[in-house]
Image (cartoon, coloured by chain):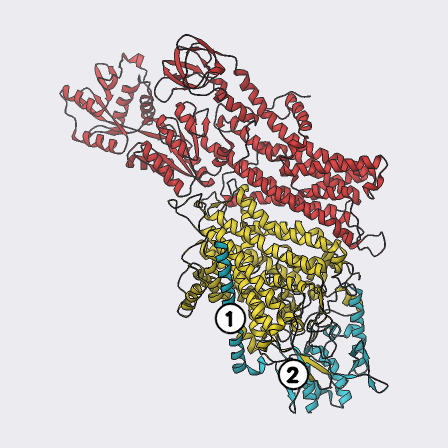
Amino acid sequence: MTIRKELVRSLVAMLVFTLLLGVAYPLVVTGIGQLAFRSQANGELVHVHGRLVGSKLIGQNFALPVYRHGKPLYQHGVLVTRPDPRYFQTRPSGTTPADNDAATSFANYGPNSTVTEKAIAANIAAYIALNGRYYPGGLTAAKVPVDAADTSASGVDPDISVANARIQAYRVAAVRHLPLGTVDALVAKYTIGRSLGFLGEPSVDVLELNLALDRL
Amino acid sequence: MTVYGWGLIVVFALVLTALALPLGRYMAAVYTGQRTFMDPLLARPEHLLYRVIGVRVDRGQDWKRYATSLIAFSLVGWLLLYFILRTQTLWSFTGLNPMGYHSMPWNVAFNTVSSFLTNTNWQYYGGETTMSYFSQMAGLAVQNFVSAAVGISVAVALIRGIVTHVATSERDSAKAHSIGNFWQDLVRTVLYVLLPISLIIALILLSQGVIENFSRYLSFTGITHIAQTLAMGPVASQEAIKLLGTNGGGFFNTNSAHPFENSNGLTNFVEMLAVLLIPAALVFTYGRMTGNRRQGYAIYATMMLMFLGAAAVCYIAEAHGSPAQHVAGLHTAVRAGTTGGNMEGKEQRFGIAGSALFNVVTTVTSCGAVNSALESFTGIGGAVPFANLSASEVIFGGVGTGLYSILLYVLLAVFLGGLMVGRTPEYIGKKVEAREIKLVALGILITPLSALFSTALATATRAGRASIDTAIAHGPQAFSETLYAYLSQANNNGSAFAGYSGFVQPVAGNVGSHGITFADLLGGFTMLFARYAPILFALAVAGTLVNKRVSPAGLGTMRTDNPTFVVLLIGVIVLVGALTFFPALLLGPIVQGLTGHLY
Amino acid sequence: MSTTTAQAPAAGPSPGRRQAVSVLRGDIARRALRDSIIKLDPRVQVRNPVMFVVELGAVITSGTWIAQVFGQPALGGHDPAWYTFTIAIWLWLTVIFANLAEAFAEGRGRAQADTLRSMRQQTVATMQDGSTRRAEELRRGDRVVVVAGELIPGDGTVVEGIASVDESAITGESAPVIRESGGDRSAVTGGTRVLSDRIVVEITQEPGQSFLDRMINLVEGAQRRKTPNEVALGILLSGLTLIFMIVVATLRPFGLFAGTNISDTTLISLLVALIPTTIGALLSAIGIAGMDRLVRRNVLALSGRAVEASGDVDVLLLDKTGTITIGNRLASEFVPMPGVSEVELAEVAQLASLADETPEGRSIVVLAKRYGIREHDLTQMHAEFVPFTAQTRMSGVDIDGQRLRKGAGDAVIAMVAAEGGQPPAELRQTLDRIAGEGGTPLAVARDNQVLGVVYLKDTVKEGMRQRFDQLRAMGIRTIMITGDNRLTAKKIAAEAGVDDFLAEATPEKKLELIREQQAAGRMVAMTGDGTNDAPALAQADVGVAMNTGTQAAREAGNMVDLDSNPTKLIEIVEVGKQLLITRGALTTFSIANDVAKYFAILPAIFISTYATVRGGKGPLSVLNVMGLGDPRSAVISAIVFNAIVIPLLIPISLRGVSYRPVGASALLRRNLLIYGLGGLAAPFIGIKLIDLIVHNLLGA
C-alpha cells in the first residue's frame, strides 16, 4: 500500500536527516569552531587574574548592591543595585535584572504606551541623577542620548553610543580623579567602528572600557 | 537618517542581487538534473540516500503522489519532533542537556512542533530557558532544514507544472503528468543547497563571535561582583540554517538581538543576506527554467521594488522616533555620536537602519527572526511588518513558499490583465481557466482568511485575551499584539509582537510551567492549516498546468516580463492585501501611527 | 415615453448590418423594468452569488427597519430608523439596477428575436409525393417541393432545380440570391422565400432546431450558457465576495475589542460596498450584449464559447480567391512583341475589348487608358463585335476590314498561322513566362500579325494590406490558402502582405496545416463555403461558414456569416476581444473602487474609536480624506455611489469597451490607466458629490 510505504520511507528519511543534519552537522561546525575560532566559539570570555569576569559581547550591570541594615536588599527576590559611579554604565534593560538568570527578553514597550513613557522618563531621570552634576552646563532630557534612555533589545547590549560614553566620561574622570582627556582617549580606543567601514553603528564596548580603566 | 543608513539598504540590495544570480543558475541546474560542480562530492551520498530511503527517483510523480509523499513526510516529522520535545529529559544521557531542563508542556509542544514543521518558528518559549541542546540540534534544527526543503520542493514542482511542455503525442488529458519527484527534490535541496551554504554561513558567523560549544551555562561575578550567567550552546550551526531556511526560531529568546547570535554589523549583514539569498535566487532559477530569464527578472523587480519601499518607510519611521520618547522629552534627531531615532528595543551595534532593515528582511520572508523588539517599533515602522505579512509573504517570501505564493498572484494578475487585452489569459503559454482560478483563489485566500478568523476568535474570547500582558499593552497595542500573533502564524512567519504569550514559565527549566492552551492550539492549527492548504492548492495548480498545451506567445499575448506587468502585479498584491487587512490594521498599527497620544 | 429608435452608426464594411435596438425604446424599457422586479426572486439571484449577498443584505436591513418602526428600536443599535430605511432602499435599488442591466440586454435581444419570429409563420410544406405536412413536423431527410412565391419550410439542401431566393429576412440583404442543386450554392434556410422557379429541398434539420430557431434562442439568451472565461471570472468574484464577508464579519469583534460597536446595517453596507457588485451586476449583460453585437454584424455564432475563442485566434486561414484577391484576373501589363510599340498594342487590345463586358475585358480598357488612349465609340466605327466562343477561344472586333483579336495563346497562334502569318519567337517565351508566374496571358493579334500579350493577373483587393497590418497588430498571423503554385502564391502573398501562404492547397493539406498550427498551440480561425471545406471548418477553433455555402459547411463551422463576407472574421475577432476586455476592465474598475469606499466608510465607523475625550473624534477620523459630512451620510453616499454606478455603466457594458488593434502591452497600459486608476479616482469624486447632496439635504 502506497501510504504505508510512504510513511516508512518518511521515517527512515527523518532518522537519516536527524543523524546528518541534527548530529553530524553541528558536530562538524563545533569541531571547526573549537579548532579555528576558539575564542569566538566560546563567547569571547574575559578573565582577570584567571577569574572569569564576563564576555566582551554580553553587557553586564556595573553596579553595587544596595544595603539596608547591613544586608543586601532584595525586592521580589531580585537584588537591588545602584550604578557604580566609577564605571561606565551599560544601556538600561527593561527586563533582565542582573541576577543569575541566563534568560534574555524584550521589554516590549509600545511606541504609544504610557508604560513606555514612564520607563523612558525614569531612565532619563536616573541618567541625569548619575551624570548631571559632572556634565558641564548640566544635563537635560533633551541632551540625553536615546540609547541611554531606551531599553536595549537583548537586555544584554554590550555597547553604548559614543555620545553616551562621552557624557559618562565626565563623571568617570571626576570620580576617578583622572584627566578627562585620558578617559576620552580610552573611550576612543574601545570604540568599535562600523564593520568593514560601513556596517552597523560605532559603539563603545563597556566591559572592555571599564577593564581598561581598572588597569590604569 | 544617515547616509550610512540609506547606503546600507542600497548596498544590501546590490550584494543580494549579485549573489542570488549565480545561486539561481546553480539551483536551476540542481532541479533540472544537470551536472553541477558539486556532483563529484555529493553524487555518491545522494544516491546512497535514495537507496536508504528506498525510492527510485527516475520515476516522476503526478501531483497527487507528490502531495502524498509530502504529507506523509510532514506527518512523520511532526510526530518525531513532538516525541523529542516531550522526552527532553530522556536524552540527557547524550550530555546535551547540561542544564537538566525538563520537557515543555503538551500544549506548548503542540504549538512549537507545528511551528517548526511549518517553517514558521513561532516561539512561545525562550530557547535558553526551555530547550536542551539536544532538542535544539536533533529536533528543531533538523526541521529547520527539511521544512525549508519542503517549501522549495513545492516551488520547484509548481515551476515544473508551468514550464513542462508535454508533447502532443504523449499528452493524455485523462492522465496526470509528472511534476517531479518529492524525494529527489527534498534530498537534492538538503544536500546541494541548504547544507553547503549553511556550513559557509556558520563559519562566517563563528569567526565574528557567534558561539558554538556544548558547555554548561557559565556563572560568574562581574567586576563589581554582581552575579551573572552566560547561556552557551552550539549557536552558529543553528543560526545559519535558522536564517538560510527562513525559519527564524532563535536559539535564545531575544533571537538575533542576542550578541551570541548576532555579534556585530557584519554578522547582521550576513544574516540578512542569508535570509533573502534563496528566496531571491529561486526567482532567477524560475526565470531560467521557463527558458526566458526575463520572466524571472520581472518577478524579481516586483519583489525588490516592494521590498525597497518597505525598507524605506520603516527606516524613515524608526528614525523619526516614537510618541513615548517625545513625550518623555528625548530628542530623537541624529546627533554626533548617537543614532537618534527610536532606539527602544534596539541594539546599539545595529542602530536604526540595521534594525529596520533586518526586520523588513525577516518579515517579507517567512523568516521571523528579529534583531530588535517589533512591538517597540513606531506605529508606522511596525505597520511595515504588518503590511509585509498582509501581502501574504510574497515579497521574496519564505524559501520556496515565497515563489509559489507569488506565482499564484501572478496567475491572478495574468487573469485580470489577460481579460483586459481581450484574450483568454495565458501564462508562459498555458491558458488560465476556471479550474486554475478556483485553485489560485483558494490558495491566495487561505492565509488571510485564517489570520482574520483566528484573530477574531482571540479578541472575542476571554481565553484569547488571556495572552495579552495588560501591564504593558493596552489600547491599540493590545490589538496589534494579538493581530500580529495570528497574522504571523498564518503566514508561517514566526516573528512576534513578543508581549503576546502562550507559555507561563516561572523559572528556567520548565519546572512548574504551563501553556496557555487556547493560544497554543489556535496558533498551532492556524499554522498547520495555512501551511498545508496552500501547498496542496499550489501542487494542484502544478498538476493542472502540467497537462496543458503550450501556445506560443504572439503580439496579442499579454507579456509577463515587462514593466507594465510588474505594475499590474504590484497592484494586485497590494490591493488584495490592503483590501483584506485595511480595517484590521486601522485598529492597531495605523492608529498608533496616526496619533501622538499615549494609551 | 419616447419611442424613437436611435440609429446605430453604420460603421464597418458589412452592408447588411442590423440596427442596434435602442435602450430607449419604450416597450423594451417598460418590459425591462418589469423584469428587473421579477428577477428579485431569490431563486434567480442565487445564480449570481455577488448579487445574492446584496439581496440578502437588503432583506436583513429591511427587517431591521420594520422592527425599528414597530417598537424594537434596539435592533438597529444606535441607528435611527431613517438611516436603516435609506440603506435598505438603496440595497434593493442595487439589486434592481443589476437586474435592469440584464433585462435591458435581454430586451434588445428579444426585440431582434421578435422580428425573426414574425417570419416563422405557419408554413405548409408540399412533400415530393404531393402530400402536405405542417412545417414543424418536417424531419431530417424529408423532401419538399417549393415553388415561386412560397416560403421554404425548413433548412435544407437543394437536390433538384434552380431558383432565386429572397433571404433578406435573415441576412437583411434585399437582392435575391441563386440557389441550385449541386455545387456550393445548394443550402437554403427555412423562412426564406423562393422568388422564381421550382426546387426540391431535402430537409437537414430536426423540428425546432432550424437556423431561425437557433438564432432566436441565441439572441434571446435563452440558451445562453456561461462561457469558460465567464465561469472563471465568476469564481474569482465569488472568492472576493467570500473574503469580504470574512473581513466584515471579523470587524465586529475587532471593533468591540477597540470599544466600538458597529451596527448590522453599517456592516452590511460595508460588505455590499466592498464586494464586486459593479461587475457582478453587469456580467451577464456583457455576455448577452456581446452576442447581440455579433448578430448585428450578421454573424450567427452557434455558441458563446466560439465567440470567446475568436478573441484568442492566433492564426487566420484565408482563401485567396474571393477573399484576398478580387477573384477575377485583371490586366496589369501590355507586353509588345519586337517592332510593336506598347501604345499600339494597347490601342488594339482596347479596341478588341470594347465590346467585351467581362471583368477581364473591362480591365483591359481601363489599363489602356493609362497610355493616353481615349475610349472609342464602337457604334461610330462600323465595328462588328466577335464574341467569345468555346470553339474559337478568342474574341474581338472587325473594324474597317481589320480583324482585331485577343485570346488564348494557342488559339491566336493557330489563327495567325492559318492566315499565313509567322508568330514571333518571343511570343512563346512571353506566354510561358506569364503562365509560370501564375498570370494569364492573352495574345493580341491584328490580322496575321501578333502584336503582343496582355498580362492578366490576380489583383489584391484594396485595403487588404491595412487589414492584415491591423491583424498583425492584434497578434494574429494570416495564412493565405491557394491552389496556385508556390511562385504565384508567393507573389500574391507578398503583394497582399499576408504572413504566410499555403500553395497548391488541397482539402487534405488544409486540414493538415490546421492540425499543425494547433499542435504548436495556436488557435486557428478560417472561413469556408464548400463541402470540401467542411473537415477544415470543423477542425478549426473558429470556423466561419459562409451563408451562401453548402449545408455541410454551415454545419461544420461554429459560426455562420450571413453576409458571406470572408473578411468578416476580423470583425468577429474584435467582438470576441471586446467581450473579454469589457469584463476585465469592469472587474478592475469594480475592485479599484473599494479603496475609496474604505476611505468613506471606515473613518465613519471608527470616528470616535480610541478618542482621548469620550465621544470626541479619535485618531482615525483624519482618514476622512474626502471630508464627508458625517458618519451616516458617508455610509449612505458610498452605498448610493455603489448603486448608481451600475446603471451608469450599462451603456459601456452593452456597447463594449472600445478595442483598438494595438499590441497587448499598449492595450493593457491603456485599460489599466482608464479602469484601474480611473477606478481608484472616480469614487472619491462620486462619493464626495453624493455626500454634498445627502449631507446638505438631510442637514445631518
Q: Is residue C624 visible?
A: no
Report which quarter residue C466 is drawn in.
Answer: top left
Identify residue type, mark 1: Leu
Using the image, name the chain to which the residue with label 1 belongs: A
Using the image, name the chain to which the residue with label 2 belongs: A
Name the residue: 52% across, 39% down: B422
Question: In the figure, is residue C374 to the left or right of C223?
Answer: left
| Image quarter hosting the N terminus of chain B | bottom right
Q: Which chain is yellow?
A: B
Q: Position of residue B577 (x, y in %)?
A: 64, 52
Question: In the figure, is residue B284 to the left or right of A131?
Answer: left
SS state under label 2: loop
Location of residue B198 with respect to B423 vertically, above or below: below
Report which quarter residue B342 is drawn in.
Answer: bottom right
In this structure image, what is the colour of chain A? cyan
**Residue on which disc 2 sits:** A190
Disc 2 + disc 1, Cβ < 8 Å: no
Label of residue A19 in the image: 1
Q: Position of residue C295 (x, y in %)?
A: 52, 26
Q: Position of residue C534 (x, y in %)?
A: 38, 29
Q: Which chain is red?
A: C
Q: Is residue B154 visible?
A: yes
Quote the CA–CA distance across marks 2 and 1.
Answer: 43 Å
Residue toward you, C511 or B182? B182
Name the residue: 55% across, 54% down: B535
